[in-house]
Image: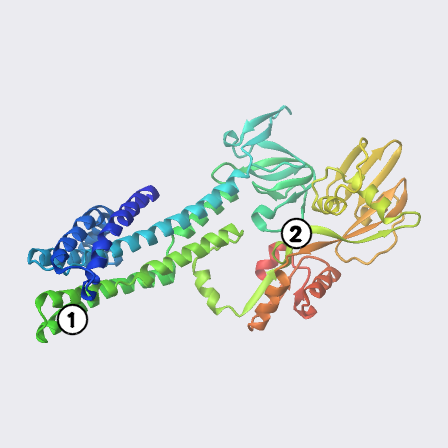
Amino acid sequence: MRKHLQRRLAVAVVFGMWSMMPALLIYLSPLGAVEPEVLWPLALASGLFAVPVVLYSGSHFYRVGWRTLLAGAPGLDSLIFLAVFAACIISTWQLATGSHHVYFDAAVMLITFQLIARLLDTSVRRRASEIIRRYLQDVPQQVVLKHPDGSVETRPANSVETGERIILQAGEHLALDGKVIRGHGQADLSMLTGEHLPQSLEPGAELLAGCQLVEGNLELLVTAGIGQRRIDRLSRSISALLSRKTTLQRLTDRIARILLPVILIAAALAVGLALLQGVPAPEAAARGLAVMIISCPCALSLAIPLVITMGHAHMVSQGIVLRDPAALEAAAKVGVIVFDKTGTLTTGEPSVNRIIPANHWTQSTLLQLAQNTLNESQHPVAKGLMAEVGSALAVTPGGTRESLAGAGTRWVYGGNIALAGRASWLREQGIDVPPTEDTGMSLHIAQNGFYAGKIGFQETLRPEAAPTIRQLIHQGYTVYLLSGDTRNACLELAERLVYPENMCFRGILLNRSTAF
């Protein structure tokens, strides 16, 4: 389809250019730029160069336009068909009578502009489809299958059926939808939910294809195979969304059907009035043709669908999916805007904002111990720590690391034991953790039974978040912030955004955000 459009457009541009050049010289003839005896040959040349454009490039419009006319539901293609047909008939008549007043260039221009618009629309839809394919390509094509006898093997994901068991290890992406039946872990669900902070998983929890297991090892029961996964359904819904017409588009289709008889009547009136005024028949016909061409509702039938399609494609590329295309039109009536914090106002990637070492520890030695303990961890907090430290501190090789999902990491090296994780977990290990104010993400560290200090993290604020909120408030919108974090974490974020505290709602979990 797209290649066919490109070929038709190429023919229209090349031959249309040569058709318009003689027409341009004819238009300049009143200024004395062209001798009168060459005007008719120039008009003939314009018509000859227009033949490939009219017969090949515009053929699709004629077929569709004729069918819709016969079906009693004329649209834009019917208008193009009638306008081009009228332009060619009148121009041929003018040539036959020896006149140089032809309108092949108008027919060529109309066809070319319509082809450009159709190609743009096709390109936008194709780009959106490529975005969907990239999402699917991020999902692995193989799984580790566990047999009833306990043995495991690597198998293509499309050969695994619902009800079979698969193994997922830390750092791996899930290829199929499944339910956890053994093990605990934390998973990054941001690919499908936008929530960047890892979510704790335990037996009975659902995990969807495309999500990454950050910590732990899981055994899952496959609940949906290839083609039935949530990500497959999402892909199909986006494709359907791009092909579905909105209420506004359906309205423009009805307007286009009404416009056709109106335009034909207007063109006939223009011809009739010209003849009554004593205007020669060729000029009267030219006036009627002008009415048909300039009345073509390109803005209604092409610009609106093109803008809506481009808007959808851009939203998909930004990770935004609309359940109903009418939502884009309803946005004009929105008065209240609700932001989910993680992944929307923030990047979901933690960054170090405070380092509080205990006695006999320095910030440098505390960072060194934390880096060694969390080395190679896929947890966002660990990644934020590594981004802070960079290559300034060397990692101590060796030792054994054990990660407990949702709790922390234990590092055993050379007779020493280091712990890094939640304060509650360190207390369970017998560490005397001093009471601290909870302001969100905190990493507590201990070594050999003694508390070493705390590293505080905050979510990295998107640089455009604060200006966007200020602009929305200035424009009269009421803006709310939802978060599942603690009160102090929400207040701290509000302070960073210079945002009223009473407009922040904390403790709103992901599955309850839509009920707000």
Quarter where residue 382 is shown: top right
State how far apart marks 1 and 2 are (Cα). 64 Å
Whether residue 258 is visible = no
Q: Position of residue 336 (x, y in %)?
A: 55, 68
Q: How is the image coloured?
A: rainbow
Q: Is residue 65 visible?
A: yes
Q: Position of residue 30 (x, y in %)?
A: 18, 66
Residue furthest left in the image: 97
SS under mark 1: helix
Q: Classify residue 419 as left or right of residue 152.
A: right
Q: Is residue 75 above or below residue 49?
A: below
Q: Residue furthest bottom?
A: 277
Task: Give SS at disc 2.
Answer: strand
Which marked residue is nearer to the observer: mark 1 or mark 2?
Answer: 1
Image x and y of residue 458, in percent: 73, 55
The amino acid beneath tag 1 is Ala
Nearer the observer, 136 or 108: 108
Q: How crowded is the residue under tag 2: few (<14 C-alpha within 10 Å), some, or many (20+)?
A: many
Q: Residue at x 26, y 58 (%)?
A: 76
Identify the residue at image location x=64%, y=37%.
181
Disc 1 residue crowd, few under 14, some 14–19, many 20+, Cα 10 Å? some
Residue at 45% over, 61% down: 328
Compare residues 415 and 110 and report the one nearer the observer. Answer: 110
Location of mark 2 (residue):
348
Name the quarter where the C terminus is drawn: bottom right
**Tag 2: residue type?**
Gly
Image mark for residue 339: none
In the rendered image, which residue does mark 1 sit on?
270
In the image shown, does 16 or 181 lie closer to the viewer? 16
In the rendering, at what x and y percent does residue 33 appear?
21, 61
**Pointer 1 or 2: first along the chain:** 1
